[in-house]
Amino acid sequence: MKIKEIQDIIVEEFSLFEDWMQKYEYMIDLGKSIDLIKPTNKIDSNLIDGCQSKLWLYAELKHDKIIYTADSEAIITKGMAAILLRVFSNQTPEDILKADLDYIDQIGLKEHLSPTRANGLVSMIKQMKYYALAYSKK
Amino acid sequence: MALDINKIREDFPILKRKVNGNDFVYFDNAATSQKPNIVIDSIVDYYKNYNSNIHRGVHTVSQEATDAYEGARTKIQKHFNVKNSHEIIFTSGTTHSINIVANGFKDLLNKNDEIIISGLEHHSNIVPWQMMAEKNGAKIKVIPINKQGELNMEVYDSILNKNTKLVFVNHVSNALGTINPIKEIIEKAHKVKAAVLIDGAQAASHFKADFQELDVDFYTTSAHKLCGPTGVGILFGKEKWLNKMPPYQGGGEMISDVTFDKTTYADLPHKFEAGTPNVSGAIAFGVALDYLNSLGFDNINLYESSLLKYATKKLKTISGLKIYGDNENKTSVISFNVEGIHAYDIGTLLDKFGIAVRTGQHCAQPIMDHFEIPGTVRVSLAFYNTKKEIDKLYNSLKQAISMLS
């Protein structure tokens, strides 16, 4: 599935929720089912800067597509990371580089992507794009 | 006299706002206090009616501004029972004040000298001394803390010696709220002729310190912790120490005579107040002190203690909740974690309920390392908070925990 199609599905899923609590409960569930980073990759060099809770991200290329895995100590951060992984993982580096993140705004979770927020998610997106850039040049 | 909390809350316009659709509950008072109308109005009044640069002007409005600025200094002098008003230096806040002293001692110490700092320190209280020690080679020794988050005074006794030249301790710990035995610390330091700097940023809003009675050498605090504006604070220093220390910054106001060969420094306090100061901030600081004194620090302390007791008892009933630094001798701060849940998650959900708390290391990584935790949720209470708000915290916290487990 293309990035835009996945984003549309997520927007539709979130539109069903009536209040923030349902939304957050869903995000927490997503966090629990994240594509978990392998213990051998859960190392300091894969830590994302700028978070109050530790956040790890790893990427590898399989059949010309990037597979991202991640983990975080905080479950809400992990849920947000899962929402990003769902869109970007298993896509080509070129598509990842072109993709925008308007869907985060549409599902009402933009506040988590504020650059001043100490959850590291903005740095995580940057890191995902860096990986895509690096792999696109190989 | 008991405080009329409903009436007091009317003084703070921000307490009326909504956050995320809920009534705003502000429990981040240790980070900064909210401001009453009288303080906000004083800043507006200054800019509307008598804004002018101070000290140098011959004109009327400059004189009015100077009088108000110096009047604020006198208010602060009285509040802390300081002998001379020129022993109060206006700074941009606690961090600036500490840097003035650290810079001053850079030239006064050499490599055989030692300084002692407490294991309860805020980042801003550690870094300036490390920078100083890099220059003069002085050694830094640390007073460790025990399980209750209190300073280990036996270790203090053992590391204090004739080479100790300076002791730096915060009056109240930023992360835990622990009140340190500063009177004892000062007395013992003076026996070996060491000077003592107390960081009062977390203390001054809760109780009144008497600098002459404490016999403290340096004391610093920030106005914004005391219902005053950000960007202004004080450094108190005993005259003999302030005279010994070189100026921190060069600029206008701090000089009395300049030729191309030599500059003569101005008298205190101007020697340390280079450039145009934060005039409106200093004036508003004075107004904030007046406001707090009109309520009475004994009343504030009594009420905050009752809030702390109520909140501690209530939060302790939540299973898996652990309070750090849970001792008798502390200000109205509760630093806690819930087993299996990250502080950041709790803080994020409480914010959705309209409750502002702080999460993380509270700029005090050494303390977090001591407890071997990545951080805590910190609830810090002020005299304008209510038991009803604590009930709301309790209920919201329980909901958050059930969502997160």
Image (cartoon, coloured by chain):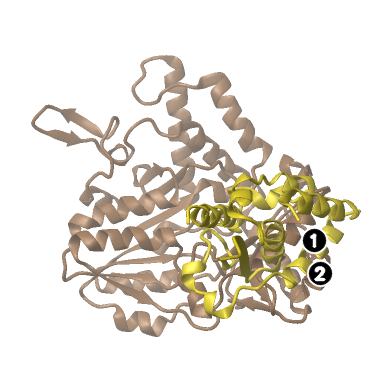
| Residue matched to label 2 | B403
Q: Colour of chain A?
A: yellow
At label 1, counting other C-alpha atoms closer than 10 Å, the crowd grade (few under 14, some 14-19, many 20 or more) is many
Label of residue B388 in the image? none
Residue B162 in the image: x percent, y percent? Answer: 21, 75
Q: Which residue sits at x=31%, y=35%?
A: B274
Residue B355, quarter of the rendered image: bottom right
Report helix, strand or loop for mark 1. Answer: helix
Label 1 close to label 2 by CB (< 8 Å) = yes
Going by the picture, which residue comes out furthest to the left?
Answer: B261
Residue A31, quarter of the rendered image: bottom right
Horizontal side, residue B59 vs residue B280: left or right: left
Number of numbered tags placed on the structure image: 2
| Residue matched to label 1 | A24
What's the amino acid at mark 1?
Tyr
| Image: B68 above or below B141 | above
Quadrant where the C terminus of chain B sits is bottom right
Tell me, yes or no, whether dots 1 and 2 are on the same chain. no
Residue B71 in the image: x percent, y percent? Answer: 47, 35
The answer to whether one can see residue B304 in this image is no
| Residue in front for this viewpoint, B352 or B85 | B352
Report helix, strand or loop for mark 2. Answer: helix
| Residue in front for this viewpoint, B353 or B78 | B353
Which chain gets the brown colouring? B
The answer to whether one can see residue B279 in this image is yes
Q: Which subunit holds the residue at mark 2? A: B
Residue B23 in the image: x percent, y percent? Answer: 81, 50
Residue B379 in the image: x percent, y percent? Answer: 67, 64
At label 2, counting other C-alpha atoms closer than 10 Å, the crowd grade (few under 14, some 14-19, many 20 or more) is some
| Image: B281 above or below B330 | above
